[in-house]
Amino acid sequence: MPAHRLRYEGPATTWLEALPVGDGRLGAVCWGLADGERLSLNDDRAWSGPVGGPHHPTPPDHPDRVEAARAAVLAGDPTRAGELLEPVVHHTQAFLPVGDLLVTTAAAAAPGVVRGLDLGTATAWSQRPVPGGTVRHETSVGAGVLVHRVTAPGAGTGLRLALASPLRPAGSTLRVPDGDPGGLEWRTLLDLPEDVHPWHPDQHEDPVRWAAPGTPSRQVAVVVRVRCDGTPRAAPDPAGPVEGPAWDGVREAHVVVAVETPDPATDPTGRPDVEAAAARAAAAVADPGAVRERHRREHAELFGRSDLDLGGRVPAGTTTDALVGLAEHDEDAARVLAALAVAHARYLLVTGSRPGTLPLTLQGIWNEELQPPWSSNYTLNVNLPMAYWPVQPWGLPECAEPLLAFAERLAAAGTATAAEMYGARGWVAHHNSDGWAQTRSVGGGWNDPAWSAWPYGGVWLSLNLLDALDFAADPGPLARRVLPVVEGAVRFCLDRLVVLPDGTLGTAPSTSPENHWLDAAGNAQAVERSSTCDLELTRGLLTGWSRWAGRQTHAPVPADLRAEVEAALAGLPHPGTGARGELLEWHAELAEAEPEHRHTSHLVGLYPLGTIAAGTSAAAAAARSLDLRGPESTGWALAWRTALRARLRDGAAVGDLVRRCLRPATDGHGTGGGAAHRGGLYPNLFSAHPPFQVDGNLGFAAAVAEVLVQSGADRVDLLPALPPQWPEGRVRGLRTRAGVEVDLTWSGSAPVSVRLRYLRPSTVRLTFGGTVLAETSGTTGDEHDVPLAAPPVRDTPGPSARERRGTP
C-alpha cells in the first residue's frame, strides 16, 4: 500500500472511522458516506464560556490553606492536608463541535464506496460507482476555509446540503452573492453554551448551560458558498440551520465553508460580527481549485521535511483497517504500520497546529461531542507537553508556535494566580487549562488533590520551550520570547521550595500526578512531601534556565536570581531507590495504591528531561520501575513508556511496546474495566486512551525519533534503541540538539550511510553502540555524507521487560 495514504472500503459508520483534515484553525473529519459526504466541523476557537469569559475567583484563604496543608504533611497527617486542598470548585470550559455539513449526492445509499486520506496532500476523498463512471468527493482545508469538490459523470448527480449541529440555532439565510449570479451563499448562526461541565455526567444534573433568552451568547457563524453547474431546486425558506439548498444535474461543484468564532485569546469580552467575517472569508475564494492547490503545496513543504521507511510489504489492496489487524501477527505488516503511524502523527501536527492558532487539545482540533471526554481541554500534567514532543525532532518547529503563544498567555494570567493562591512570585498553571488560558486549580466540586492540586503545569510547558531552544537553527529570536516565560516559572519554583527537617530542599504539600499511596490503615492518600516529579521538574527547569540565561544578550540576568537558582540546585536531593531496586516516586518508600498506574511521572528525568543518563544507577532504577508498572496501559502512557525504554537503550522492550501501541483498539470511551487501560489504534489510526487522545499518536512519533537518534549539544547517537523487528530501514530529516539534520540508512541493525545537514555551525560526534564513528564539523547550510569504512557491529539488544521479570 502507498506509504502516505489511508484507504478504506465502505463508508465510515462511526466518528472513529472518519478521516481528519485541517489547517490548525478549521478542522473536519470526513465520513465518505454511501450517499455523499458528512463533514464534522470544528473551529479551534469554539469553546464554551459566557460573553466576557469565565470568572474564576480564588478563595481568599487559599495561601493559608496551603501553609496549613504543609504543616499537616510535615506533622504526618496527609488526610488533613488533602482536605485543606479540596475546596476549589472551578472547572475548565469545553472544546466544542460546530456541527455536521451533509453533502448528499444520491437519493439512497449506494454500494461500492471507497474512501481514503492522502497524508502528503492533506486531502480526504471518497467515491462510488455510477453508470458511466464515479461520483467523487474531495475535501481539504486551507486559507482558512474548507473546500469540498464534487464531480460526477454524464448527466450529473443531485446535490443537497444540510447542517446539523448540537449548538443552539440562532438564524439562517440563503442568498445569491453580489456579483456572482451563478453562486449561492448560505449563512448560519449558532449559539455557544455559557458553560459545559466536565465529562462526568453522574456528578452534574445540568452539564450544558445556555444563556437565558434575550441574553447575549458567544456565537459561531458558518457560511457556505456553492458554485456548481447544476440546476437549483426551488429552495424553501429555511426555518433553522438544518435545511439547505439543493441542485440537480451537477457535474462539478465546489462547496466552500468558512467558520468564524470569537477568539478567546484575542477577543474574550466582545461579540464581533462573526457572520460578516465568515462571509468575507468565503467570498475571498474566487478560485477554489487554486486555493486547493496552494494548500497542497504548503502542506507538502511541511509534511515532506522528513520520512521513515521500515521496509515491509503487504498485499496490494490491503485497506488501512485491515492493516491494523494484520500487523498483530505479521512482521512485514507491523513495519508498514509503524512507519505509517509516524507519518500519520506528523500529518496530525501539520493539520492541527499552525502559527496563529490555539494549541492541540486532548483531541487535537477534532471533537464530535458537546460534553467531550475531559472537556477536550489542555491537560498539562503530561498530555499537552507530550503532544509537542515530536515537533522538534521531526523538523516542524512552526507547529510549536501555538504552544509558545499559549504559554505566554498562561504566564500573563498565572502571575495573579501565583500571588493569590500561593503568595508566590512568577506564574503558575495547574493540571488543566482551556481556550481561555485558565490557570487556577480545578475540580468542579469533586476534585482529588492528586490531580487538581498539582501546580507544575507551567513548569512542564516551560521545559518544552527550553528544549525548542536546543533544537533551534537560530535560537536568538526564539529565546527573546521563551526566556521571560521560563524566568517566571523559575521564580515560582523557587518560592515553592521549603527546607525540610533533614536540611534538604523539597516541596510540601506535594502530589505526583493522578497517583496515590497507601497509609498504614490502607487508605489512599494523594498528598505528601517532595514527589520525585516535583523535584525533577524543578531541577530540569532551573538547570535549563541557568544554561540559557547565561547566553542571552537582549536582557541582563538578575544576579540575585542566578544566586538563588544555584543555591536551590545545590540543595535539591536526587531520587531515592526502593527495596525492589526501583526509583522512588516520593521522598520515601510508600505503599502504592495502584502499582500499575498509567502515569510514570517519577521517571520524567529520564524522558523527556534527560537529567538521568543511560547506564547510570538511576537509569537502572528507572528500568526497574518500568518493570514493576507492568506492560499494559493507556495509549499515551504506552507511547511515553516507549520513549523511556528508548532512553534506556532497550530495543527489545521498545519492540514489545510498539506492538501494543499499534494493536487494534477495543473500546470507544474506556469508562471502566480493563479496556480503560488498554491503548491501541482506532480504524482511522487515532490513538486510543481509550477514548481518543491525540497525544497518544504524537507521543508515539516522539518515541520513534528517540529509538532512531538521540542527541546532545555536540553528539548524535545513531540507532540507540532499535528493536530487533526493524533490522533494515531509512529515515530522512531527523533534527537534533547538535544543530544537524540526519538522514540515516541501516541494515543488519547497523548504520550503512549517514548524511548530515547543518542548521547552524556545529561540531558533532557520531556514535553507534558506544563507539565513536566520526567527528565532523560544518557551518550553516553545509551538507555532506559521513564516510563509514565498514558497517559497525550492533550490540546485542537488552532484555525485554517480560524477560527481566521472568514471566512467559
Image (spheres, rainbow, N blue to C red):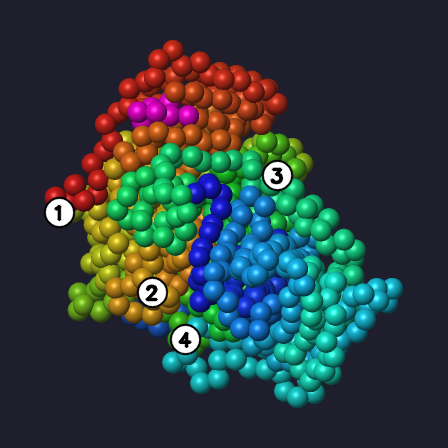
- Type of amino acid under label 3: Glu
Element carrying mark 1 = loop
Amino acid type of the residue tagged 1 in the rendering: Thr
Q: Amino acid at mark 2?
A: Asp
Foreground: disc 1 or disc 2: 2
Dominant SS of magenta comes to: strand
Specify which label sits upstream in the sequence, 1 or 2. Answer: 2
Write down the region rendered in magenta: 745-751
Residue type beneath disc 4: His
Q: Residue at x 51, y 32 (%)?
A: 733
Q: Residues within 10 Å of mark 3 (few under 14, many from 20)?
A: few
Instruction: Give x and y (percent) for residue 97.
Output: 56, 69
- Quickly name the residue at label 1: 807
Rendered view: 684 above or below 38: above
Q: Nearer the viewer, mark 4 or mark 2?
A: 2
Do labels 1 and 2 touch, CB within 8 Å? no
Q: Secondary structure at mark 4?
A: loop
The tag on residue 292 is: none
Of marks 1 and 3, the one in the foreground = 3
Rendering quarter of residue 525: bottom left
Q: Earlier in the sequence, mark 4 or mark 2?
A: 4
Question: Where on the picture, by quarter, is residue 135?
Answer: bottom right
User: Residue 301: which numbered mark, if any?
Assistant: 3
Identify the secondary structure beneath mark 3: helix
Q: How many marks?
A: 4
Residue 200, disc = 4
How far apart are the two marked residues, 4 and 2, measured between alpha carbons?
A: 18 Å
For label 4, the crowd category at 10 Å Cα-Cα, with few meaning under 14, some 14 to 19 and many 20 or more, is: some
